[in-house]
Amino acid sequence: MRPKLEKVSAGNGSFLSFEVRQLSFDFFWHFHPEYELTYIVSGQGKRLVGDSVETFGPGDFVLIGPGLPHVWVSEKKTDQLAVALVVQFSAAFVESVLSFPELSAADSLFRKAQQGICFQVARHWKPERKMKVIAGLQPGNPFTVLLELLQELTVKKSRTLASAQYKLLRSGNDGRRIHKVLKFVQDHYREPITVSQAAAMLHLSDSAFCKYFKRSMGKTFSDFVNDIRITQAASLLMETDLSIAALAADCGFENISYFNRVFLRKKGIQPYKFRESRRENRKYNMPND
């Protein structure tokens, strides 16, 4: 298990575009030298980009830069298919795009993509239709529509995902080792997880493992575990009526006081206020953009 180097071939075209349609998004921590634009049509779970951990759902729209490890993984299997629209293009394609004066502003966009960019999709802006044209699922000129979409992205609200401190996992050996740990945390975050368990997986001492993980991911192992758990807790706060104590326990927190402190530190708001604010937003159907 490792972050795999995915080989991308655009065939005779300038870019590669396709639809992913499956029962669920499996854990496939990978990277490639191409840029990647991904739009989630259906499905939900966690999105990992570098050291960023967030929930995703329909409308999630992200641009990933070359060499940046990423994965969308379904939280649970449902009757709903997991569907994504993906476009991948090379650095050479980006160079040619930037040669057009009308697209010169995209230079900043592609530089930010080195950390991953999440775009804010609002009701009056629906990139899904253009992504379907680019993927060949609807009539239209894919190349022209891709250029139009890239131009739109230069002015849309967005935020970067991976931290500036995150080191891209360009080393194959580091990639193979860290992937094993990340998948273990993803699969077992509801259970007690110790540094010793993770260190043993890589045949390292606890102290050596902690240094290795911090160097690879830009954060401590315990901080990463908390990221996974808090991301899931935030999702449960929005989607269920579970008591805060019950959902904290379900996400692997044995102490409610500790959960409250970590949630406040990660989200900047207390859990019950987070739930109230999200419910108010849904109640009034407040636009995002």
Image (spheres, rainbow, N blue to C red):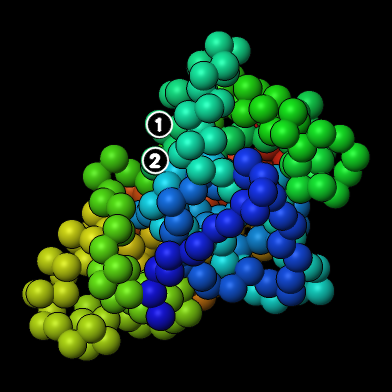
Q: What residue did someone put label 2 on?
A: 114
Q: Residue at x 24, y 45 (%)?
A: 165
The location of residue 85, given as percent across then percent down, is 71, 51
Asked if 21 appears above or below 276 in the picture, the reply is below
Residue lying furthest top: 101
**Where residue 105 sits: x, y (%)?**
51, 17
Residue visible at 88% across and 44% down? Answer: 138
Q: Work out how far the residue at label 2 is from the one at label 1, CA to CA, in angstroms.
A: 6 Å
Q: Relative to residue 278, is residue 189 depicted above or below? A: below
Q: Amino acid at mark 2?
A: Gln
Q: Nearer the viewer, residue 260 or 39?
A: 39
> In the rendered image, is residue 126 in sight?
no
Q: Which quadrant is home to the C terminus?
A: top right
Judge by depth and name the residue closer to the eye, 235 or 154.
Answer: 154
Is residue 96 shown to the viewer in this render? Answer: yes
Apparent side of residue 239 relative to residue 91 in the rendered image (left or right): right
* Label placed on residue 254: none
| Quadrant showing the N terminus | bottom left
Residue where numbered disc 1 is placed:
111
Q: In the visual, does 40 lie left or right of 204? A: right
Where residue 262 appears, as percent x and y from the top left, is: 34, 56
**Secondary structure found at label 2:** helix
Q: Marks 2 and 1: CB-CB under 8 Å?
A: yes
Q: Quadrant of residue 174?
A: bottom left
Circle 1: residue type: Arg
* In the depicted structure, whether residue 60 falls above or below residue 22: above
